[in-house]
Image (cartoon, rainbow, N blue to C red):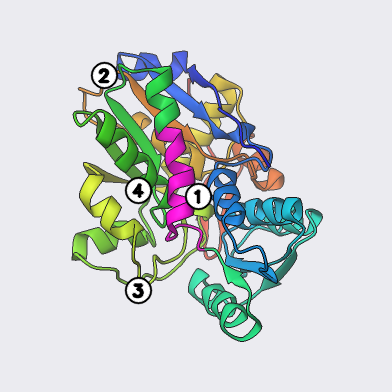
Amino acid sequence: MATLDTPLVPSPYLSRLCGGDFLLKLEIGQATGAFKLRGAANAVLNLPADAPGVTCCSTGNHGRAIAFAARARGLKAVVCMSKLVPQAKVDGIRALGAEARIIGESQDDAQFESRRLADQDGFCEVSPFDDPHVIAGQGTIGLELLQQRPDLETVLIPLSGGGLAGGIAATVKQIKPSIRVIGITMDRGAAMHESVKAGHPVPVTEVASLADSLGGGIGAENRHSFALCQKYLDDIVLVTEDEIYCAMQAHYFEDRLVCEGASAVGAAALIAGKLGKTLGPTASIITGRNVDMTVFTDIVSGRDVRLGAMMLKGKPHAA
């Protein structure tokens, strides 16, 4: 069930845009295709020896990681997801032997079913972000970043429920307090952004997004990730669907990477000019590769893409 120390590689194209070193932390190399395996493996390894099974809610990548880790421990896994989760991610979870339950229209609906399994059937529930073992697992990315490039001045982190951002930010700030940590998320249905702005967890309306794995709420009773993001993130930047579309193209054509929309939000913010001009050596987390390849093919081909009621107009990549 080992996770990998993933490479940190330069992006010549994005480095030219920011006028300095712009580096990509390739979490797409993990066995399940995303960083989530770090936290899930740590959490599942710490479950009681007599655990009857494990459950979670997920937008896809956490569920895939839980399924992988549970199979390695010989545990039954039930992953609860909403109808907004792409079929490719559902299929990936089932391929690992877990049960995938599609519940409702939002991450909150899936969360209720996961909680019911824990309360009524005795399953151990592992939050995708608000669990100390999960957060600690994701925080190992921060350790690797500063081992690989001690001179980093800025870290760009895709921001959803805050397990990744909170874990990395808390880790790097303890080692290097001067480092700047920026959470980046889509501009529609951004739960952690709205919660930090309000000063407490707030519900949001979840909508279809190219950055689908950043969707969902943070939970009204959030105990860990909200406080970490509130304390350690220096800024939160919002990007549009069009900006994510262009960034996915850039990673493909310039960096030769197949990555999810959530992986591309750091590049999206840079290309859109939303990060300022004093970044210094910068690392962006390429969080996952588990993208719907039909949609991805449309994006790199410059075709229109439908997101629920929204139609994104296609556009060619401009180097």
| Mark pair 4, 2: CA separation | 22 Å
Q: Mark 1 near mark 3, Cβ–Cβ under 8 Å?
A: no
- Between discs 3 and 4, the one toward the N terminus: 4
Reply yes or no: does residue 27 show up in magenta. no
Give the farthest residue toward the bottom. 120
- Between discs 1 and 3, the one toward the N terminus: 1
Horizontally, residue 30 falls left or right of residue 268, namely: right
- Between discs 1 and 4, the one toward the N terminus: 4
Is any atom of residue 239 visible in this view? no
| Mark pair 2, 3: CA separation | 37 Å
- Between discs 2 and 3, the one toward the N terminus: 3
Q: Where residue 216 appears, x then y in whole percent?
A: 46, 64
Look at mark 3 in the image and give the residue it sits on: 221
SS at badge 2 = loop
Q: Quadrant of residue 55?
A: bottom right
Amino acid tagged 3: Glu
Look at mark 1 in the image and give the residue it sits on: 211
| Mark pair 1, 3: CA separation | 24 Å
What kind of secondary structure does the magenta stretch mostly adopt? helix
- Closer to the camera: disc 1 or disc 3? 3
The region drawn magenta spans 127-142
SS at badge 3 = loop
| Mark pair 1, 2: CA separation | 26 Å
- Closer to the camera: disc 4 or disc 2? 4
